[in-house]
Structure formats: C-alpha cells, structure tokens
Amino acid sequence: MARILLIDDEELVRAVLRILLEGEGHEVIEAANGRKGVARQNEIPCDLVITDIVMPDMEGIETIIQLKRSNPDVKIIAISGGGRTGNTEYLVQAQKLGADKGLEKPFSNAELIASVEELLARPPDC
C-alpha cells in the first residue's frame, strides 16, 4: 500500500495509529516531533504525512510549511485536539498553509482510514 509518516509527540497516539494503519496494509514511519518528522521525510520520502499540530520543539504548522517547501506534492493530514486550550482553529490554519485535510481529536478509526484512502487516491496537484 503506502508509506505513511506519523508525527505526534504522544507515544500512545503514535502506537494506536500505527496499529490501525499497519492493519490496513500501510508501512508506518514514526517521529516524535516536527523537527524529527521533517528529517525522516527527507531521509525516507513518504506518500502521506499525518502530523499533530500542538507539539514541543517544532509545532505542526511549521512542520507542514517545511514539508511542503521540500516536497510540494506530499499529502498531509493535520490532527489536533487543540492542546491545553482546546482551540481547533489550528486545523483551519494548517489547511490554509498546506495540509490537505484536518481531523479534530478524538476522531474515529473509520474517519482516519477514509481520509487516508481519499488522499492516497487523489492525483498530485489537486
């Protein structure tokens, strides 16, 4: 299937999403923050990136900007529960800056899988 880069500072979130995505036949590469995620994408290009927005070191908005700068065709799903403030406006900003889709935590397994399938089926430059 596809190679997916999963960027989230919460190890448990990464573990759960990895199991879900691998169960769908995808290869999953993990990164604990945006800086590591950008480095991983440069080392091992992935078909799709799922990134949290509120993270230490390099937050998701900057991560999306850097990922799109180096690989404009990479498809990105931004995920966020809004951090401590619960502000989901981050997802709107993420989409304005290059994310193809935004999902508010908590989202269902079906919602994530449908989003992944939709973006992977989409041709470049859509």
Image (cartoon, grey):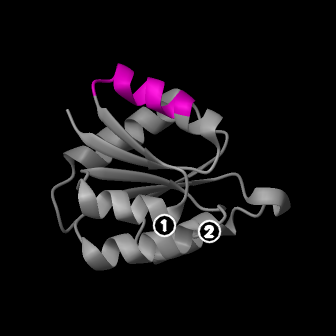
Residue 10: image x %, image y %?
65, 44
- Of residues 22 and 108, the one drawn nearer to the viewer in this rendering: 22
Query: In the rendered image, which residue does mark 2 sit on?
Result: 57
Q: Which quadrant of the view contains residue 100?
A: bottom left
Q: Mark 2 touching mark 1, by CB under 8 A?
A: yes
Q: Is residue 100 visible?
A: no
Q: Does 41 appear above or below 14?
A: below
Type of amino acid at the residue the image marks with label 1 = Arg
Residue positioned most to the left? 123
Q: Residue at x 48, y 67 (%)?
A: 35
Q: Is residue 111 above or below residue 62?
A: above
Which quarter of the figure is the N terminus placed in? top left
The residue under the point 19% across, 68% down is: 125
Percent position (x, y) of residue 52?
A: 57, 55
Report the side of 68 relative to 89 (left or right).
Answer: left
The kind of residue on which mark 2 rests is: Asp
Viewer-side residue, 39 vs 66: 39
Q: What element carries label 2?
A: loop
Please indicate whether residue 56 sits to the left or right of residue 62 in the image. right
Residue 14 figure quarter: top right
Quarter of the figure with the C terminus: bottom left
Q: Residue 35 carries which label?
A: 1
Please give left or right for residue 76 compared with residue 13 in the image.
left
What stretch of residues is rendered in magenta?
Answer: 15-25
Which sits earlier in the primary sequence, circle 2 or circle 1? 1
The question of residue 123 being in magenta is answered with no
In space, the residues marked 2 and 1 are separated at their CA atoms by 7 Å
Helix, strand or loop: magenta stretch? helix
